Amino acid sequence: MTSPRLRLVDKLAAGLIVTVMVVAALYPETFITGDFSIGSQRITPLTLLLPFVGVMAVVFYSFRRERVQTGIIDLVLLAFMAWLLIRNPLGYTAAVAIKYIVYGAGFYYLVAISTRTPGFLKLVLFTLLSLVCIITVYGFIEFVVQRNFAFEAFIETAVRKPRKGLHRAGSTFAHPVAYGAFLLQIAPFCFLEAFWGTGKRWRFFGVTALVMATLALALTFSKGSILVAVIAAVAAIAFLMLRSGKRALMVALLMLAFSGVIAATFWQQWSSEVSWRTEWSVQAREIGWRASVDTIIEHPLLGVGLRNGTDEINEQIDRYWRDSAPAPLPIDNYFLNVFVEEGAVGFILWMLFLFFMFRDGLRGISRGGILCKPLAIAAIVSAACLCLNAFTFDALLMYGNYVFFWLAAGILRGTSSKRTDTDSGLPDYCLGRTMPVEAL
């Protein structure tokens, strides 16, 4: 029997996790009005929550450590986080490294352990769907009035003002591309509840959130996010079409029709030149890529440090601006940034973590050794979508998206654990009371 003290700790942990989710969605610490540097370099709501997350992670792990079994994925993650701290020991970069560690390992384990708490998954899913409905309203308002309130001036320096097209939509404080990456992360959970939620009300809530997220994603005109969304949708349609049963075919056809509407909207925006970048924007991206590659060549093993390689990068960029000799591949790339900042050592550790995370999740699903297979699938798709999107946008460097990546990873870690206290409070599709994914 769980003691009252432990039940209180469970409730405090769940409340803190939900608070972090809400703050990360409504104030994602990316580009902020008036100063378009990375917002995580300033004191913001997520920064203020940092000590609470750190303390609760230690306390909660001490009380509930039996809920997660230590494995190689934990050793790799802790090695990566230790490398961040060792590699960035001085001054300001130490604070940033600590923030990465707390919102990485700390939040990750808070979620993983809380996943075993009765009712926690329902609370998380309700929060996710509610947040999507809340933040997409802002994007729709921007679409109706054809104005991006926070970023209109900034966007027009990078993207040509459309002659007859649609304006890009963002969230309350997020750049449209970061907003698109967030929506892409949450869509798999919306899809899960839309088609396999508990009862008609949950499914209606899921359908509403999924439609709003998909439409808002199209209005961001984030090419990388939309491309990844198309890949995920095609994979889902193919999976459903290969399954027997009328319901699977109906779901696939609905997805296909909805995808067609989104594709038409996307093409209308494309043809109206809303996506065309200014010459300054293209050149800046090209030069940034070239400078990053050359910095990696000069510092291949150790990198230049988390947010501490500004001087090295700026020196390279200044030289390329003077020479006017940009390289091809004008894209942002998170994995490139990891290599620049943490070198081959940090890059290899990070890639190993991703490998073991997806491997353990897929292995648990295929062998049936997982607490909630449908939810684990949604978590895998969510994390995979962000990782794919990171090839065209350094989304994981934005703390809002970073938090929700660790949410998905933590859910996957928790559902993969063989230990459980009770199944009470889990979503019904985890208990086989409604049609699960594998039954289609």
Image: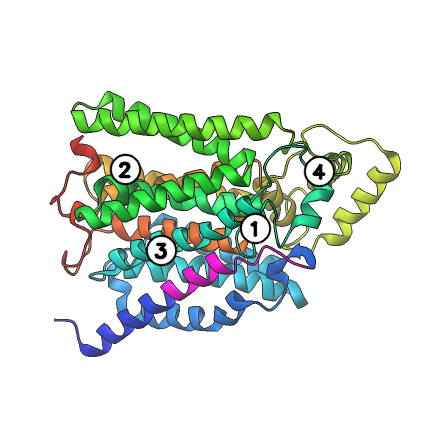
Q: Measuring 34% from the left and 52% from the top, which residue is drawn there?
A: 129
Label 3 secondary element: helix
CA gap, disc 4 and disc 3 = 35 Å
Label 4 secondary element: helix
Residue 193, horizontal then vertical, whole percent: 26, 45
2, above or below 347, in the image: below
Q: Nearer the viewer, mark 3 or mark 1?
A: 3
Q: Quadrant of the C terminus?
A: top left
Magenta region: which residues?
18-33
* 114, 260: nearer the viewer: 260
| Residue position marked by numbered label 2 in the rendering | 363
| Residue position marked by numbered label 4 in the rendering | 285
Residue 109, horizontal then vertical, whole percent: 36, 59
Among numbered discs 3 and 1, the one appearing first in the sequence: 3
Label 2 secondary element: helix
> Of all residues shown, which one is farthest toward the right?
322
